Structures are given as structure tokens and as C-alpha cells.
Image (cartoon, rainbow, N blue to C red):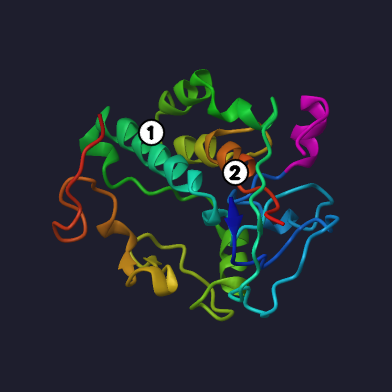
Amino acid sequence: MVVNLGPVKLLLNLQGARPNPRKDGMGYNPRCLRRDLNIHSALGGTANYTYLTLMEVDINGFYNRYMGWPALANDSHPWGVSTLSTQPI
Amino acid sequence: MWGGDPGAVSRVVIPPHSNDHSKLTDPSPKQDFFTSPGDPLFFLHHAMLDRVWWIWQMQDPEMRLNAIATVDMTSMNDTIAQFGPKSKGGKVSQNPDEIVIDLGWTAPPAKLLDMTEALGGLGGKFCHIYA
């Protein structure tokens, strides 16, 4: 599959990453879609993480678990966006 | 790209879309915040997240339907202000009553508190439930 827009802000200087012809990232820049499937990023998509999220009593606890903050626990939202379209170069 | 031991991951990787965009300069592999919707699965992922939120709300709708997180969003807002289509360096309010969701050319701006109810939100335009 091919993606066309961006990259706007690549956070890693990947080999083969081609900057967008336009500064705002809206130029035509066809390249292969990339995904990043691995056991660590996938942890946030497991049933027990979702369960833990749903067990949070107040909105801040829910939000934090959901968004991964305090982060770094491979939580529900980040696992997906990190797996999908990772560094779409 | 998220390989390595989980300890290393939890020390280094800052999840994209998380609050802590201040650490975006960390030398860790991350996706491009703005082109992730180029993957169709992005939308399935967010629909599922919306469902999880809805399930959480429905456990106590009276208290939870309009509950808005008050955790600090400064770093996220800085990123939006820097790269977002509309904000042009402006700060985003921390007050839930004043927060406006503006996705640029994808949809008209809408007040955050008008968008918390799947059934009847946004002046009745939202009309869906999750199974």
C-alpha cells in the first residue's frame, strides 16, 4: 500500500526517508506504508490492558492509562499509533 | 522498532499522541504524528478507542459522560500549536469549558463538551452506540 502525504516531522532519520516536497507536508510523496509489529508495542492492545483501563475510577486515571501517561507502559492508544504507519517512509 | 527488553522500552519510548511531546527529541523510533492517518487501520484503532471510552462512560453515565481529564496537556498543546493547521503558535486553553477541537480542513471546530456524548452529542448530530 502507498501513502502520499507527509512526512511532516520524522523523528528518526531513517534510511530511505524522503522529505516531502512541500514544507507543510501536503505535497505528493508516494512511498510504501510501513507498520511496526512487535511484542512490545502490541502489549497495549491486549485484553488485560483494556481491562485495566476500564477499571479506572476517575477520568484522569482513565485518561492517563488510555493515553499512556505516565507513559511508557505500552498503553492502549499509543500501541496502535505506534504500530500503524510507523515512520511512513 | 520497539524491540529490546520492556524495561528499555519503558525508559525510552514516548508513545506518540501521548501527553509528553516534550520528549519528542528523544532518540527513539516513533512514527510521524501527522501522517499516521495514512494507514487505514488508524481509523479502526481510534474507533475502538472511542468504544473503550464509551464503555467506561456507560459504567456510570451520570458521572462520566461529561468527565474531562484535567491532566496537564501543555506539551501536547505545544505540538499542536507548532504544527497544527490553525493554531499558529497560539496556546490551547486548559479549561474544559473553553476547549475547542479544531481539526483544520477535516471538520468545522466544535466545543469539546459538545462531543462527549455518543448519543445526542454535538446538538444531536452524534447518534451512535457501541456494541
Q: Nearer the viewer, residue B36 or A46?
A: B36
- What chain is tagged by disc 2? A
The 10 Å Cα crowd at callout 2, few under 14, some 14 to 19, many 20 or more, is: many
* Residue pointed to by mark 1: B52
As for residue B2 lying within the magenta part, the answer is yes
Q: Nearer the viewer, residue A34 or A54?
A: A34
The amino acid beneath tag 1 is Val
Q: Position of residue A51 (x, y in %)?
A: 45, 21
| Rendered residue at 54%/56% (across/down) | B38
Which segment is the magenta one? B1-13
As for residue A24 lying within the magenta part, the answer is no
Quick one: SS at disc 2?
Answer: loop
* Residue pointed to by mark 2: A84
Q: Position of residue B53 (x, y in %)?
A: 37, 37
The 10 Å Cα crowd at callout 1, few under 14, some 14 to 19, many 20 or more, is: some
CA separation in Å, label 1 and label 2: 19 Å
In the image, residue B87 above or below residue B126: below
Q: How many marks?
A: 2
Between marks 1 and 2 in the image, the one whose residue lies nearer the viewer: 2
